[in-house]
Image: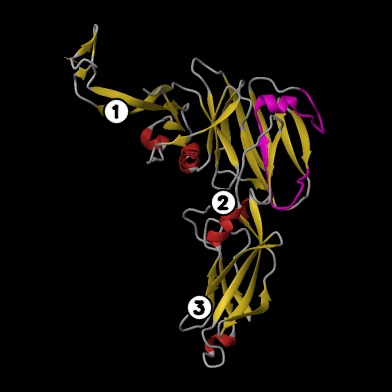
Amino acid sequence: MIFETTPPSYSSVNESLVYVVNDAHAADAVTYPNYKYVYEVWINGTKQFTGKVFPHPTTFRGIIDIGAVVREYVQPVLNPTTGLLAQEFGEGKFSVSIVVKIREEYSGTIGAVVLTDSTRVFFNHYNGRFYDFTILGSFVAKPTSNRGLKLDLSSTTNYYFLPYFSATTTPFNITVTQSGVTRTKIITPTAINTLQLFNISLTAINAATWDAVYSNITAGVYTVSVGGVSYTVNIVCSGLYTNYPLHFMNKFGGFETMLFNKARKRSIDIERKEWQQLPYRVNGSGVASLKSGIIMNSQRSILSSSFKNKMRINTDLLFDADYVWLAELLSSPLVYLEDGGYFYPIIITNNNYEIKETLVDNATNLTIDIDFGRQFKTQYQ
């Protein structure tokens, strides 16, 4: 028995993870009746799943897709700190290590393991429209981001995330430069195939301990460089409006931040449950009345009500590259709104997203509607 196809390096758990196995026994229905390929999925040394497939009716190969199984074992959890290195995502959060083992079943009996694949690492990204099984390989030792290279940041923002993918434990540098002075920090990943989540806010940078050159960054413009990519950060005034950083999981499985610092509009969705009764009441003496003293009887009454907080928020004017990138925000399954130092999980309720271009649409901003995803109850009666 042999593996004829295995998933390529940096494959996504959100796509198909296809193994093709072939054994001559599958074509011999006389000696090996009711033949099946039995596959086991081992995660971190523990068998987590067993499945069976019949041989293909013409080629007799076993075609196995474990994508739906493996994706259940990657659960990203955002737990940031205010430091420069806000969080490191590794096994079980950004990646998962898999071994597939094959057994044979025939005549109703499952035999011993006859084929064991090497350990393969799969990742929590998605591809979208692409020409191959994976896009992540192009972002090794680079920021795992499609955002533009220029960004605005309020001086009052405490968290602003930039993810970086390290496939090895080789140390690398992140640098911050302002007015010709470069601060350098050496980062050493604790394990292979990890995602380093950097907090590039002014607060985090000034609180960091740098390995080479240290002095505070001041308001204005500074450059953050990592993995050969440089981002120009422009510190902007907080302005008249409440500033809301939105932190979201991007298409690579890392978290990024976008600042919504223009006008907001708040609203409340209310849901009522009511019951109905006759307009009169009959007392213990048998007297019918439409009122009790000077209070009229109600015919329709509210049993209970509940409400949800919603909000419409806006960015500043956007570059074309940011409009393309922010499609990942609208489609992200994990989005947090930061307010008052707390991260609130939200649901973006916009179901359509138009990618605008300055040449066609002039300079524009992005408006989104958000639901805080929690329903509150009022009093019962």
Residue 206, position in %: x, y? 73, 24
Q: Secondary structure at mark 3?
A: loop
Residue 339: x and y, percent?
55, 24
Residue at the far top: name it.
294
Q: Quadrant of residue 277?
A: top left
Q: Which mark's residue is nearer the viewer, 2 or 3?
A: 3
Residues rendered magenta in the picture: 188-215
* Residue linked to disc 2: 125
Q: Establish if 159 lies above or below 121.
A: above
- Image quadrant where residue 353 sits: top left
Quadrant (top left/top right/bottom left/bottom right) for the N terminus: bottom right
Question: Quadrant of the rendered structure where residue 52 is?
Answer: bottom right
* Residue with the mark numbered 1: 274
Residue at which label 3 appears: 54
Q: Amino acid at mark 3?
A: Phe
Residue ID at (71%, 23%): 217
Residue 140: percent from left, percent from top = 66, 52
Residue type at mark 1 is Glu
Mark 1 / mark 2, whichever is N-terminal: 2
* Cα–Cα span, label 1 and label 2: 46 Å
